[in-house]
Amino acid sequence: VTAIAIKLDSKGPVLFRQKRYGFNNELIEVFKFRSMYTDMSDATAAKLVTKDDPRVTRVGAFIRRFSIDELPQLFNVLKGDMSLVGPRPHQPREVEKYERHHRRVLTIRPGITGLAQVSGRSDLSFDDEVRLDTFYIENWTPLMDVAIVLKTPLAVFSRKGAY
């Protein structure tokens, strides 16, 4: 249904692929449902990171609001590039700006959901996100993963921090 809606709403592929850093500083290709128009230049895209981003399609706004755009990352989990739970994989342009203590998040496999996602999502500052991800890494238990997975639908349906 999502694929059909994306195709009817705008031109371009259904899936979006993006290089991100994963476990051990390794570049991985992360899959998402496409939520933006494909006809904007990279220079324009780099300048536009706002809550009301004009690059986002109508369908894209909906699938982002409910994190449906993230579902293709289950293929990344099956490939072994990602886990269900862990720190979010970051883009190379973000990792270039990491300070030494930020690199700790690259020591485990990234996840589709994680402590930062259930604690504020995009409303968190980068430092808060790294602090939560570091706490997760240093205090991990299987029960923590279960708790995060159970909290994820609540975070998704609250729509707080989803842009």
Image (spheres, rainbow, N blue to C red):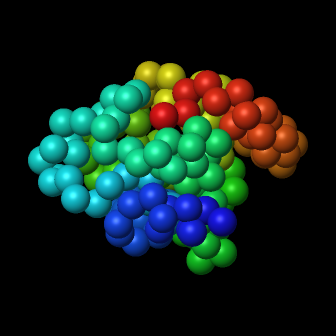
Rendered residue at 64%/42% (across/down)? 66
Coordinates of residue 106 in the picture (x, y in percent): 46, 51
Left or right: 98 in relation to 135: left
Left or right: 76 in relation to 78: left
Quadrant in which the N terminus appears:
bottom right
| Residue 34 visible in the snapshot | yes
Rendered residue at 15%/54% (across/down)? 41
Rendered residue at 85%/45% (across/down)? 146
Q: Is residue 141 above or below residue 17?
A: above
Q: Is residue 79 above or below residue 163?
A: below
Q: Nearer the viewer, residue 97 or 154?
A: 154
Where is residue 157, by image quadrant? top right
Q: Nearer the viewer, residue 153 or 59?
A: 59
Q: Is residue 81 above or below residue 138?
A: below
Q: Residue at the far bottom: name it.
A: 79
| Residue 116 visible in the snapshot | no
Coordinates of residue 100 in the picture (x, y in percent): 33, 37
Rendered residue at 46%/45% (across/down)? 58
Left or right: 50 in relation to 153: left
Coordinates of residue 161 in the picture (x, y in percent): 55, 27
